[in-house]
Image (tube, coloured by chain):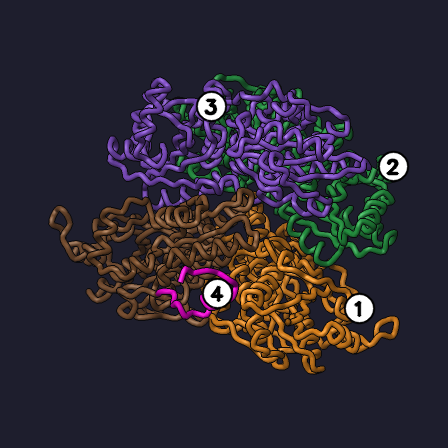
Chain colours: A orange, B green, C purple, D brown
Amino acid sequence: MMRIGMLTSGGDCQALNAAMRGVVKCIAHSGEEVEFYGFKNGYKGLIYGDFRMLTSHDFSGILTKGGTILGSSRTPFKTIREPDENGLDKVEAMKQNYYKLQLDCLVVLGGNGSQKTANLLSEEGLNVVSLPKTIDNDLWGTDMTFGFQSAVDVATQVIDNIHTTADSHGRVFIIEVMGHKVGWLTLNAGLAGGADVILIPEIPYDINKICEAIEARDKRGSRFTIIAVAEGAISKKDAKLSKKEYKEKMANYKYPSVSYEIAEAIQKKSGHEVRVTVPGHMQRGGAPDPYDRVFASRLGAEAGQLILDKEYGYMVAYKNREIVKVPLNEIAGKLKYVSPDASIIKEAKMLGVCFGD
Amino acid sequence: MMRIGMLTSGGDCQALNAAMRGVVKCIAHSGEEVEFYGFKNGYKGLIYGDFRMLTSHDFSGILTKGGTILGSSRTPFKTIREPDENGLDKVEAMKQNYYKLQLDCLVVLGGNGSQKTANLLSEEGLNVVSLPKTIDNDLWGTDMTFGFQSAVDVATQVIDNIHTTADSHGRVFIIEVMGHKVGWLTLNAGLAGGADVILIPEIPYDINKICEAIEARDKRGSRFTIIAVAEGAISKKDAKLSKKEYKEKMANYKYPSVSYEIAEAIQKKSGHEVRVTVPGHMQRGGAPDPYDRVFASRLGAEAGQLILDKEYGYMVAYKNREIVKVPLNEIAGKLKYVSPDASIIKEAKMLGVCFGD
Amino acid sequence: MMRIGMLTSGGDCQALNAAMRGVVKCIAHSGEEVEFYGFKNGYKGLIYGDFRMLTSHDFSGILTKGGTILGSSRTPFKTIREPDENGLDKVEAMKQNYYKLQLDCLVVLGGNGSQKTANLLSEEGLNVVSLPKTIDNDLWGTDMTFGFQSAVDVATQVIDNIHTTADSHGRVFIIEVMGHKVGWLTLNAGLAGGADVILIPEIPYDINKICEAIEARDKRGSRFTIIAVAEGAISKKDAKLSKKEYKEKMANYKYPSVSYEIAEAIQKKSGHEVRVTVPGHMQRGGAPDPYDRVFASRLGAEAGQLILDKEYGYMVAYKNREIVKVPLNEIAGKLKYVSPDASIIKEAKMLGVCFGD
Amino acid sequence: MMRIGMLTSGGDCQALNAAMRGVVKCIAHSGEEVEFYGFKNGYKGLIYGDFRMLTSHDFSGILTKGGTILGSSRTPFKTIREPDENGLDKVEAMKQNYYKLQLDCLVVLGGNGSQKTANLLSEEGLNVVSLPKTIDNDLWGTDMTFGFQSAVDVATQVIDNIHTTADSHGRVFIIEVMGHKVGWLTLNAGLAGGADVILIPEIPYDINKICEAIEARDKRGSRFTIIAVAEGAISKKDAKLSKKEYKEKMANYKYPSVSYEIAEAIQKKSGHEVRVTVPGHMQRGGAPDPYDRVFASRLGAEAGQLILDKEYGYMVAYKNREIVKVPLNEIAGKLKYVSPDASIIKEAKMLGVCFGD
């Protein structure tokens, strides 16, 4: 009899349920007798012993269901080694709950912070297998994360909708796309939506270049311009600031987000009326698309197989179209950025996309 | 040979093209010889003689296309009787262009302001037929406007997406829905999305009632609450202000929109973390849904028939599931509100929806 | 304490769960103490006492879920008064199970056959309230049934997809749409999808008229023709057959369905290659659209109110945009057809749609 | 001044327009002066000199548009070297039209047959660059073809819809998925849709294994079974037939397609009622999904770059997440099958999917 704990951690995304179903189906199908313990709301549930036993019934029909049936939370990556407000040693608490339940393995579905904690627990001696979850696609060690393609779909739908209204009214429109500190989501949704300008953190922008692109479109008779802006986009000027200077700037930042700063700058320079749309959390919500359902199911199955094979301390990952395992200690603390020299950037530029550089 | 002018005015919406296609197909199918003149960017095109001749080719394949192939603009409803910055008499200019092109009729697709101007032109002696366009569904004289149902679909999709993430994280989420001064869009999207709280302009809210609803959900074990807020929602307190007092309040309004004020109030009173999503313009963009395609096509066909019958001075409208004509002077300047006693409100309350009253 | 039985009967459709949720939410919200008994697989469950108790948990999150959580079956409308293969009197069995469970009311969600049985049980003295379910929209006594608009959406999506490939290849394409003996679904999906020819049971077709329409399109340079055919479409010739003659014809019918007969006839007469697509059951599957979610929720709430008011023997219905109650004995056994003189038919003809008449 | 011919050949699919837009945008953006000649309906247009000049206006707004603005046709791959019915030498005719128009290059968007003809023209001395188009994903030399992921989306949507109705009625449902002689589309849509049984040409099936899988589900209390069948699926028995024997069998084949044969066999063996849905051509129609829009745009840009670099005789392809060029003579006449040992098959089996082997 195996006893397996499972938790989903960090901002939720599409296909979390599909991935968990994959793990469970794989182990159930192996014939291995098994009990699943679902910790509620991420690591919180593991720290405070908040869990429920899961039956195969819980995993039935969830392949297409958005969110996570376990609940998630962002706490507490950075302070994981600090005691909580009641003096509880969180790492020790997680270990105790793991041992108390006599778990054979802990399955963690999470993004960067969560993988770091997964590695910590692995180093502390727990058997851990993790899966790469995030709409940001910024996880080091894997070509792709689940949730990403579904988020691209949502953000693209937003750009599509804005496209028709921008065209009707001859306006400049900014759509602010999620993605944390990296540009994958904005880049792909921008290309899919036919954005004229795409601004990502990895390529700091010069407002003058953006205005030139708008003017060039004006001259060609294009009544409107679509600008996809990553929430982490940064100007060339700001990119040169020291950490301290940047912190000071943001402390007094008067804009709700970078898109509004860009909108104001364009309006000032070019005279164009600029509108901003910030779709926000809807990008991580809703049902997973077929791509993510297949991808997360495959990852889940392979994670299940790792557990059956008692191969612990790994994240399942995607490399050159195959699912592989990557040691947790190799990925913890690293981010996967879009390289400004990537061929997709080169191709986007061939298509006439302006990156503001 | 008939000569027909056409313009789309005000904020764009889904199914504008479908409606124009309906008009053109109906007249073309009648065998009547006809020339179509499309004025660009709403009444602006009529004022400044900015138009292009349209052929049947222009209307091919646009049934499913969002936006408007003619372009639109919001200018200039309120100041229509005032001269422009060069001293041009705008009403006179529109009449002159109408007569210069020897038009038999002007077709106007628009919302409230546009219908008012359509009526003005009708009273000035032009032959006008209009169609009820708006995602707000606030046009007096018709049970339904085209664009509305498609906008309900978009707003519902946003709520659906937020639903999964709200559930995963156990959060209170506000989705701000368009609709101008009326609550049709928020009410329908809210019900379709299973919102727990729906706030519309026609039913001023009390923040305490909202917090009570959230608490009641907490007690029943519901980890999250979905609140659909109309952009025109107003508190009971503000509803009691005089026009002057309200204007003063809004002059110093520190929130980007009413949703943020509500979010802060809930956070303060209940301690819950509250997130706000403002989908904005995407609600009026994108392809029309099947309902709107059928509806706008039918309206277009009947508008075409009015023209063939030389019945001018009317807006085509929807009453008790039939398409009828309504005199333009009966609808100009009126708004169609949601009645707080409407059966849909009563039914929403039966379902447990909190309106904050 | 109230005890309420519930069943979904006949072909399933979208929004069945939404409607049941409406009933349950309404009664739960009223404060009335209540127990729900869900009979499995339609009347079968009532006949054979196959049920399970339902808690509010069962109705949580099902607003957007397709199908029916109770299961459905088509049996046994026509033979309801005949004993089953073991000699069981089915009507008596249903009554006994109703009384054994001490039910206060039975809620039936169903189409034509199911309403007839609901009326029978009502006449036998049971307290019955019913809801109008069917993608066919053929229920007498209501302007609209739930499931219909969602099915229009699916069928329209099919036509949209076929449209692009028909255009690319310059082909004549037939899409066979569901709808049983009436044309509502085909008519609406056909108009929404811009079909050139629409064939419905209520307007028997002449194959020559269809070929003329295709030729007329050829002459205008249209490379393709889209034909929406109701599964119940009938030729003028067949419409004139006596019941016996028609039965004989169908006994030796060599086509999988009427669309293939039409396709062959067009191919023979016009020389055009004709392709047939039969989307079939997918039209009744999948998530309900926002329109149906609102509509079914409203119907459910009003059905719940009827129960609270102890008003039995009614179907909730939609008339002139209000939800009303209609006596079960008024609707049983009647069908709501599309009138060939309906304004929507007139408008479709204005738009140039060929009905083959 | 460059002169570039372009044609789309074979069954149409999603993202053909997106790919052409990519080619055109890339070359236009390079500053090179260029004229585009669009041949109508595939190679037919090149053979018979049926073309039109294309301006940048033709490529505006087509990123999201299904089908192909050039039209397509399947003729005439196999008989390309034979004279037509008027004795015209087709290969010679294509060469003459190419030289008459003084083309610098011919761009071919097509699948297997079309690539073979592209190679033939290349060997005949024409400058050819091609792009990998097909929903089947069966092109040798590339990891992925455009159209494939969009077709997966459509087929998955069909399975999703059938899922709810299968569940409601407790039925066995077969969905027949396209894919020609390979199983890529069925495999991915089947996994995305949670199919219980997936039958692909590469893994011949044993009807007994399928019935065992259905029975096993019955025993676990699953009321329904979803079977995704590739149009090219073949039984173990048939797979052993000689070509001649198989031809004889198919000459007298009494089923509309393999799915109906399987349905009958299951019904006979297991007693289950089995329904078949054949979505057909809709799988290649409709708008491209975001994945395909990005992918086709990238391929188009790189094809444009090959032309600018005067690198002819290649198909642009996708290998290990990069766009590369593959010599036309390396890919002509080969098919890319799903390997029965592929990790995706292994993972599907871990998830409990039955392949009938």
What amino acid is at disc 3? Ile
User: Residue at point 25% right, 59% down?
Assistant: D241
Q: Residues within 10 Å of mark 4 (few under 14, many from 20)?
A: some
- The CA distance from mark 1 to mark 2 is 49 Å
Which residues lie in the magenta part? Answer: D337-357
Q: Quadrant of residue B339?
A: top right
What amino acid is at disc 2? Leu
- The CA distance from mark 1 to mark 3 is 65 Å
Q: State left or right for residue A314 relative to residue A73.
A: left
Task: Provide residue C312's location: percent of width, then percent of height.
Answer: 70, 24
User: Residue at point 61% right, 39% down?
Assistant: C15
* Residue at image mark 3: C345
Q: Which mark is residue D349?
A: 4
Q: Nearer the viewer, mark 3 or mark 2?
A: 3
Q: Which mark is residue A48?
A: 1
Q: Are marks 4 and 3 on the same chain?
A: no
Q: State left or right for residue B297 relative to residue D76.
A: right
Q: Is residue D316 magenta?
A: no
* Residue at image mark 2: B241
Q: Nearer the viewer, mark 2 or mark 4?
A: 4
**Secondary structure of residue under mark 3:** helix
Q: Quadrant of residue D99?
A: bottom left
Q: Quadrant of residue B212?
A: top right
